[in-house]
Amino acid sequence: MGWIGQPGRCRGPNPYRGAAGHRARRSGGGKELGEPASIGTYSVRLYRDLSSGDYADGLIRPRDGELRQAELKDVDGDGQPELAVTLVTAGSGNYSTLDVYKIRDGHLQWMPALSKAP
């Protein structure tokens, strides 16, 4: 996974590599361009070959807060890493949300059963 735009306070290795050599990419420093900093959307993009821009799939998801971290880790214990995206709400609460994505057959799939809302 590589970062597009400014990663802000996001952490993680660069680039991330997904299953079967796919790479995922997150854009906009935790938000899409032109949106408020505290609410809006974020996008996750999957590339077959990041260096040539060979796009495979992508998703746009709502967000309440800023993207804090994106990492590949085995969330469900099946031996395959999922993309885990942590978002933190603005304000004094700093509530965390975890969005989990599987990479299956060259496509991203949001996994609501593995994801956690505040």
Image: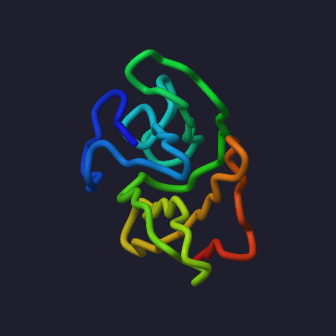
In-image side of 17 versus 8 (left or right):
right
Q: What colour scheme was applied to this rendering of the protein?
A: rainbow
Please tell me whether residue 117 is drawn above or below residue 108 in the rendered image: below
Q: Where is residue 42 shown, x and y percent of the image? A: 55, 41
Residue closer to the observer: 12 or 66: 12
Residue closer to the observer: 30 or 90: 30
- The residue located at (61%, 79%) in the rendering is 78
In-image side of 109 versus 40 (left or right):
right
Q: Which quadrant does the C terminus fall into?
A: bottom right
- The residue located at (74%, 76%) in the rendering is 113
- The residue located at (55%, 47%) in the rendering is 20
Q: Where is residue 82 shown, x and y percent of the image? A: 55, 64
In-image side of 68 versus 82 (left or right):
left
Q: Where is residue 21 shown, x and y percent of the image? A: 48, 43
**Number of marks present in the image shown:** 0
Instruction: Answer with the quarter of the image where residue 86 lies.
Output: bottom left
- The residue located at (26%, 43%) in the rendering is 8
In-image side of 80 versus 70 (left or right):
right
Please tell me whether residue 91 is drawn above or below residue 27 in the rendered image: below
Query: Residue at the top extreme?
Result: 52
Q: Which quadrant does the N terminus fall into?
A: top left
Query: Residue at the front extreme?
Result: 20
Instruction: Answer with the quarter of the image where residue 90 lies.
Output: bottom left
